[in-house]
Image (spheres, rainbow, N blue to C red):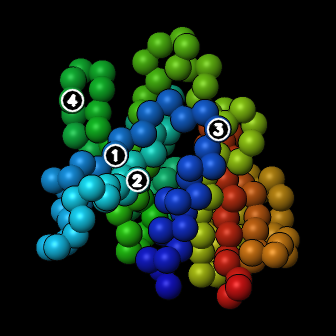
Amino acid sequence: AVDDNLLFWCAASFYIQALPAIAMVGPQHAPLAPGTNKNIMDRRLAHVSLLVEDYHEAIEFFTNKLDFDLVEDEKLSETKRWVLVKPRGQGNCSILLARASDDNQRKFVGNQSGGRVFLLLTTDDIDRDLVKLKKHNVKIVREPSDEVYGRVLVFEDLYGNKWDLIERSNL
């Protein structure tokens, strides 16, 4: 199910080693069901921040090469925007494209996880998506391989961050 895939992708993003910022959804966005114990927190990962060099080139990469949807693009100031992209399908977890604003931030563009896989994205058809990635000249770091949890390939985004693309097996 697509929703399960996106939930896995969002949950798996906790794997991230060096994440500059995470925005959490507050209670006003995730209300508790009637009768729910208010001592138990209801939290969801809403956005994962990804440092980028340029808003326009990052939007183009995610929407045209990875088939993500542009959810929001709002100007906050002359130099800062609120840009959210997310994989097509169900689910609400998205990526906040955050333009690096100083030399310290710029040195982490493309290396937010110290060379490890940064984000994990699931798919219902890894072969179909591999064809699309290659068609759009996305760098494939490792061709699909069979693992205990499913088939996985590794690709790089436009800045060099590594991603796993996983077609989960029915465990």
Q: CA distance from mark 2 to mark 3?
A: 16 Å
Q: CA distance from mark 4 to mark 2?
A: 23 Å
Name the side, left or right, on which 145 lies relative to 45. Answer: right
Numbered mark located on residue 76 in the image: 4
What residue is drawn where x is 49% and y is 39%?
Answer: 50
Q: CA distance from mark 2 to mark 1?
A: 6 Å
Q: Residue furthest bottom?
A: 170
Local crowd size for mark 4, using a 10 Å CA cut-off: few (<14), some (14–19), many (≥20): few
Badge 2 marks a residue whose secondary structure is strand
Q: Is residue 92 visible?
A: yes
Among numbered discs 2 and 3, the one appearing first in the sequence = 3
Among numbered discs 4 and 1, the one appearing first in the sequence = 1
Q: Position of residue 40 (x, y in %)?
A: 31, 58
Q: Position of residue 159 (x, y in %)?
A: 62, 37
Badge 3 marks a residue whose secondary structure is loop
Q: Identify whether 73 is placed above or below 127.
A: above
What residue is drawn where x is 29% and y is 50%?
Answer: 25
Q: Nearer the viewer, mark 3 or mark 4?
A: 3
Badge 1 marks a residue whose secondary structure is strand
Q: Can you identify the residue that label 1 sits on?
A: 24
Q: Can you identify the residue that label 2 sits on?
A: 45
What residue is drawn where x is 55% and y is 20%?
Answer: 106
